[in-house]
Amino acid sequence: MFNLLHSGRPSHQSSTIPGGETYVCWSRMQAEAGQLLDEIIARKERERRASGGVFLWGVGNAPSRLINSLARLSVSVPVVFSAMKTKPKSADLAPLRTVAWRKYVDENGIERPLPASSLVTSRGDSALGVKARHYALMCYSDTPLSLSRGIPFDPTAYRNAGGAGAPVGASQVTALLKQVDKPAAASSYEVNIAAWLTSGYWVRLSDPIELNTKTISEIASFDGGTDQWLDLVRRARGGTAARPRKITQTELLL
């Protein structure tokens, strides 16, 4: 398996993996919410620097059922980001509306405000109208985030964790995988960014707020320090966050 030692395992995580399984979270990344990939990586690096290594990466699909169990057990799960081979969709390059997500539901069903440094944005519209669901990978790295080249990632050496263990589907953008074979020495995908899952691992987001044109422009042109970044995030998310609360079963099913 590829070497992730350079990205630093969070100190609270255990190296014990139930059943001897080797898990990895794989996510294919591309432009999103009107920002190109290199701009998103720069924003995530600002988050990482401002929070001692933690950053949240927004994803469109719901997590594997195993995620909450792995998070509660603090199992070490590396996360690999690979650039998509296809061009970004026009809706991602120029969305009709953009939202910032303000809360997340942790592995115990508690709705909490996002970390003060985290700015997770997405398109605010979907095929069904206003977007009601989005998710995020909660990640940790003790090294700066940048787009690396030259380390192959072979998805054919993995299967989906849980269920029947199906191969990775062409339409799967983010997936929790388990290794079943030795990776090939060459692959069309690379380990472009590597980190570790932390805290809630892969969470459902909630409480979106639409961003106005001025705020979107401020995010795109930001060139300040940590204090200025924290202030921008606070303003973009609409001020003071609410207190954590327990999510009801009905809300979890929505």
Image (cartoon, grey):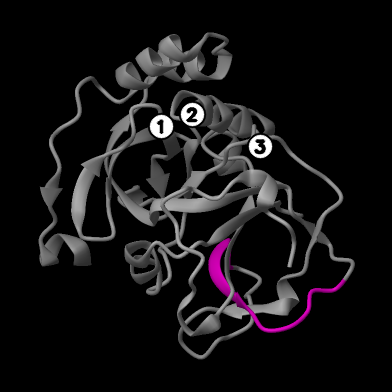
- The secondary structure type at the circle numbered 3 is helix
Q: Quadrant of the C terminus?
A: bottom left
Comparing 204 with 32, the one in front is: 204
Left or right of 38? Residue 117 is left
Q: Give the residue type that dot 1 points to.
A: Ser
Q: Quadrant of residue 203?
A: bottom left
The residue segment tinted magenta is 172-184
| Residue appearing at x 53%, y 24% in the figure | 46
**Residue 245: x and y, percent?**
11, 47
| Residue appearing at x 46%, y 87% in the figure | 163
| Residue appearing at x 46%, y 20% in the figure | 216
Labels 1 & 3 near each other (Cβ < 8 A) = no
- The secondary structure type at the circle numbered 1 is loop
Question: Disc 3 marks which residue?
Answer: 37
Distance, label 2 to label 1, CA atoms, is: 6 Å
Q: Nearer the viewer, mark 1 or mark 3?
A: 1
State the mark number for residue 118: 1
Give whichever of discs 1 and 3 has the lower sequence position: 3
| Residue appearing at x 56%, y 40% in the figure | 32
Q: Mark 3 Cα within 10 Å, few/some/many (few <14, many 20+)?
A: some
**Residue 161: x and y, percent?**
51, 79
- The secondary structure type at the circle numbered 2 is helix
Question: Disc 2 marks which residue?
Answer: 47
Labels 2 & 1 near each other (Cβ < 8 A) = yes
| Viewer can see residue 224 | yes
Count of marks placed on residues = 3
Give whichever of discs 3 and 2 has the lower sequence position: 3
Q: Give the residue type that dot 2 points to.
A: Glu
**Residue 85: x and y, percent?**
76, 55
Comparing 1 with 156, the one in front is: 1
